[in-house]
Image (cartoon, coloured by chain):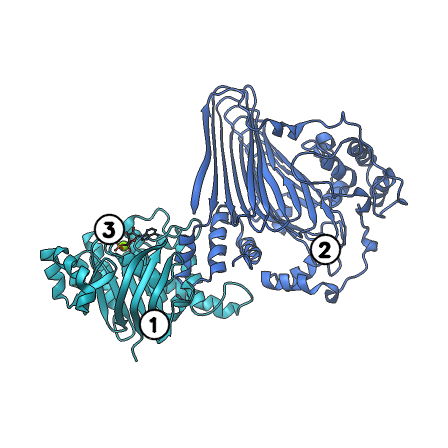
């Protein structure tokens, strides 16, 4: 059975200002959705609110994941349920090597703390498997092995940070992944590498919500659904052909629609 | 990390620049202040309290040569005359009368593992310390209070002529060598606690590395305090002869006791021409301990001395490892790490004295304060006349985890030479919400995320440690961080 992320009439405020104004959207495993929309329309706000950033306050509506309202859950609980967010601006963490971090994250996902006595032998075996897996994933994203020893995102180039996010996604194996402009800042080849890495995960147990400004990555991903977000709402949904329409016409023709969105619905 | 640069001083060829004038008290001589201490309150010998007789008795028990006995007695007189330091932390609760200055081996009734408090056992468990070591750390087994207990000399070291003994054994077996260097780097007149240590010292390590010998494995020793109100006054002397290389590590874990406890060690390092000497300390004192330690090194021509010093726990730590660069091209690297939790004051830092040309020093201080803890950086940088082309770089990073905690920086800089390059940089940071969120979005709990950021902050220290120490240190920090969220 597919896992479902169901967003119902979501209103989100940041520092008292309402950014999302009644957003409704359903993403199921097995599907790839894309969201496009002008700068400042609230795409990242949606992504961060879904993941549970404390600054993004849900004032109305529901986020149901696997039948459970997750609005009150902590970000780590959401992650353990199977949500993942590839950040538009991945954070830099000094002194924490990428590999060590991911190992801790993976253990946390498996419900093991980082503390307390553990089965040393089993641990060592799991660790060596993990190392191998990490190596493979880094290869997949064309990242040099040495990145595993480098501090998390510190001094990574813009594109390297984005690819590292996808390495993380591959290691943590979410059911629903939100990719916030992962393709921005990537060179031509990297867009393809990232898209192929996402495609590799596709199947009945994986769904994605891909936020982007560009057609290019969508040409590789072939999303099942394309949504346009303007001023905190989805104003239009369609299939891949909507992307071409947007490329040709821009967003202006939909802005009026945004004002009337409530009426149309 | 949200990092704010609070200060950047960069001066080339600037003369006599002093920051925080009052910090000069550091090296001041207190002997002009009249000071005496009631000593007739207790009966002699090994009962709590200090007297001339106690000092003599310690020396007698150890069967020491006369010169050491005289050295102790002189130091005792100096101790009496010197007033308590008035800077640094609050020392008013120390009562010299209630401290035991020496416990003979026979004093020690055999403790069994069952007597060790549950709390302590649990801590060992969580630290993942091996069984044998736990017993040792908890003071179980054939071990004595004030002696160095644990020395592993590998055969090949002995073959190379490396001496690695307890200070007591060193004095017995190599009296001439000890006499030549003992007290030359830190004289009893240096400060009240150095005088106290010189009077009642016991235990510690004595190491001599002959010319050109490279010691590949770190030499290690464990110390502990295992009796209530037991003072620990170990004394360490390391001589790295020309062109040699050695790394010494001391790790401390103290069981928790409720009464005041005093730890006052003296460490003297001598790095001769071209020698490379690193001294690592990883200390985790229980929260009632006053940790007042004098650590000093001299570095001759082209020699390098590295102090790597981590302070966790204790009620108050005052410790400023120093290096006197006496020969051209000498180098000092001081890395001081402190973690100040509830009710704790870590007053730490480093001193670099450039007394020769082309000498280089770096001081890096990293502190974390939380739950009302206080971390103070106190640094002293001196470039003496004639030490041209000296280079020094000081960097202090403080991480403050909550509103109740504090961090302060007292850099004292004194420059008497024109051609020098000095850099000083200090940052104070808080952990950013976005960083915590980022890590939590990968499945880590809030406290795990916070620990990870703190450990990352400490990484410049951790990466200098051998693996087993690094793991232990990380676990210690994780334990300290627990319950700090929410
Ligand atoms: N933490 C915040 N504090 C203040 N304002 C915020 C915050 N986060 C978002 N906003 C505001 O909310 C609005 C939506 O921002 P958001 O980042 O969601 O847009 P976006 O659609 O992702 O834009 P882009 O395409 O440029 O990434 C913007 O006006 C932005 O300034
Ligand atoms: Mg955005």
- As drawn, is A203 to the left or to the right of B184? left
Q: Residues within 10 Å of mark 2 (few under 14, many from 20)?
A: some
**Which residue occupies the extreme bottom position in the image?**
A1
The residue lying furthest to the front in this view is A263
Chain letter corresponding to the colour blue: B
Ligand 1 within 8 A of label 1's CB?
no
Q: Which chain is cyan?
A: A
Q: Is residue B356 left or right of residue B142?
A: left
Mark 1, secondary structure of its residue: strand
In the image, the residue with mark 3 has its CB under 8 Å from the nearest atom of ligand 1: no
**Mark before the other along the chain sequence, 3 or 1:** 1
User: What residue would you read off at disc 1?
Assistant: A64
Looking at the image, is B420 positioned above or below residue A103?
above
| Ligand 2 quarter of the rendering | bottom left
Q: Position of residue B425 (x, y in %)?
A: 47, 35
Quarter of the image for residue B322 reads top right
Query: Can I make out residue B269 in this image?
Result: no
On residue B257, the disc is 2
> Compared to B24, does B219 lie above or below?
below
Circle 3 residues within 10 Å: few <14, some 14–19, many ≥20: some
Does dot 2 land on a helix, a strand or a loop? loop
Q: Which residue is mark 3?
A: A185
Q: In x, y percent, where is residue B128?
A: 59, 62
Q: Are marks 3 and 2 in contact (CB under 8 Å)?
A: no
Numbered disc 2: what chain? Answer: B
Q: Is residue B333 visible?
A: yes
Question: Chain ID for label 1?
Answer: A
Rendered residue at 70%/42% (across/down):
B265
């Amino acid at each position: 059975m597919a896992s479902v992320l169901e967003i119902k009439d979501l209103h989100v405020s940041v520092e008292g200002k309402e950014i999302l104004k009644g957003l409704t959207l359903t993403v199921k495993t097995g599907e790839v959705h894309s969201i496009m929309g002008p700068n400042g329309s609230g795409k990242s706000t949606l992504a961060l609110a879904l993941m549970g950033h404390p600054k993004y306050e849900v004032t109305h509506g529901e986020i149901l994941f696997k039948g459970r309202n997750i609005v009150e859950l902590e970000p780590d609980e959401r992650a353990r349920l199977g949500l993942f967010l590839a950040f538009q601006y991945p954070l830099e963490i000094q002194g924490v090597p990428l590999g060590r971090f991911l190992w801790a994250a993976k253990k946390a996902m498996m419900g093991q703390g980082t503390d307390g006595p553990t089965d040393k032998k089993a641990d060592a075996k799991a660790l060596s498997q993990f190392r191998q897996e990490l190596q493979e994933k880094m290869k997949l994203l064309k990242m040099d092995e040495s990145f595993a020893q480098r501090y998390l995102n510190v001094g990574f180039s813009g594109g390297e940070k984005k690819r590292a996010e996808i390495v993380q996604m591959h290691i943590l194996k979410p059911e629903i992944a939100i990719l916030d402009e992962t393709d921005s800042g990537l060179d031509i080849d990297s867009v393809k590498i990232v898209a192929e890495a996402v495609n590799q995960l596709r199947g009945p147990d994986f769904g994605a919500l891909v936020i982007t400004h560009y057609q290019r990555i969508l040409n590789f991903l072939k999303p099942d659904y394309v949504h346009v977000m303007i001023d905190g709402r989805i104003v239009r949904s369609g299939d891949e052909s909507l992307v071409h329409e947007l490329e040709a016409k821009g967003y202006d023709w939909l802005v009026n629609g945004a004002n009337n969105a409530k009426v149309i619905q | 990390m949200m990092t704010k640069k609070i200060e950047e001083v960069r001066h080339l060829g600037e003369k006599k620049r002093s920051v925080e004038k009052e910090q000069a008290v550091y090296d001041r001589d207190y002997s002009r202040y009249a000071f005496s201490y009631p000593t007739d309150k207790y009966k002699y010998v090994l009962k709590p309290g200090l007297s001339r007789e106690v000092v003599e008795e310690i020396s007698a028990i150890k069967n020491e040569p006369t010169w050491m006995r005289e050295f102790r007695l002189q130091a005792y007189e100096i101790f009496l005359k010197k007033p308590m330091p008035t800077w640094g932390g609050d020392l008013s609760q120390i009562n010299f009368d209630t401290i035991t200055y020496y416990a003979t081996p026979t004093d020690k009734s055999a403790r069994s593992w069952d007597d060790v408090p549950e709390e302590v056992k649990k801590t060992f468990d969580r630290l993942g310390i091996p069984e044998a070591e736990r017993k040792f750390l908890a003071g179980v087994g054939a071990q004595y209070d004030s002696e160095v207990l644990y020395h592993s000399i590998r055969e090949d070291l002995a073959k190379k002529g490396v001496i690695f003994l307890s200070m007591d054994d060193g004095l017995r077996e190599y009296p001439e060598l000890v006499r030549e260097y003992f007290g030359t780097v830190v004289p009893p007149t240096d400060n009240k606690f150095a005088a106290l240590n010189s009077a009642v010292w016991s235990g510690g390590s004595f190491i001599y590395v002959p010319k050109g010998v490279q010691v590949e494995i770190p030499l290690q020793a464990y110390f502990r305090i295992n009796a209530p109100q037991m003072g620990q006054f170990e004394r360490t002397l390391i001589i790295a002869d020309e062109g040699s290389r050695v790394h010494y590590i001391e790790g401390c874990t103290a069981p928790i006791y409720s009464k005041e406890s005093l730890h006052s060690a003296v460490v003297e390092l001598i790095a001769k021409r071209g020698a490379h000497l690193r001294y690592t300390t990883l200390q985790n004192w229980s929260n009632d301990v006053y940790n007042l330690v004098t650590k000093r090194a001299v570095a001759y021509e082209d020699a390098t001395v590295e102090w790597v010093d981590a302070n966790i726990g204790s009620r108050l730590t005052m410790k400023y490892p120093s290096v006197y660069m006496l020969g051209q091209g000498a180098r000092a690297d001081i890395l001081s790490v402190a973690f100040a939790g509830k009710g704790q004051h870590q007053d730490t830092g480093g001193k670099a004295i450039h007394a020769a040309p082309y000498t280089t020093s770096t001081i890096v201080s990293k502190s974390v304060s939380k739950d009302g803890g206080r971390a103070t950086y106190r640094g002293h940088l001196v470039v003496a006349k004639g030490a041209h082309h000296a280079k020094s770089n000081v960097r202090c990073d403080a991480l403050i985890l909550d509103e109740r905690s504090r961090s302060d920086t007292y850099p004292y800089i004194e420059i008497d030479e024109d051609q020098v390059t000095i850099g000083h940089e200090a940052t104070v940071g808080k952990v950013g919400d976005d960083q915590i969120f980022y890590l939590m979005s990968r499945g880590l709990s809030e406290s795990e995320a916070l620990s990870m950021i703190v450990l990352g902050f400490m990484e410049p220290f951790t990466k200098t440690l051998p693996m087993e120490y690094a793991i232990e240190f990380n676990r210690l920090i994780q334990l300290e961080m627990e319950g700090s969220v929410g």
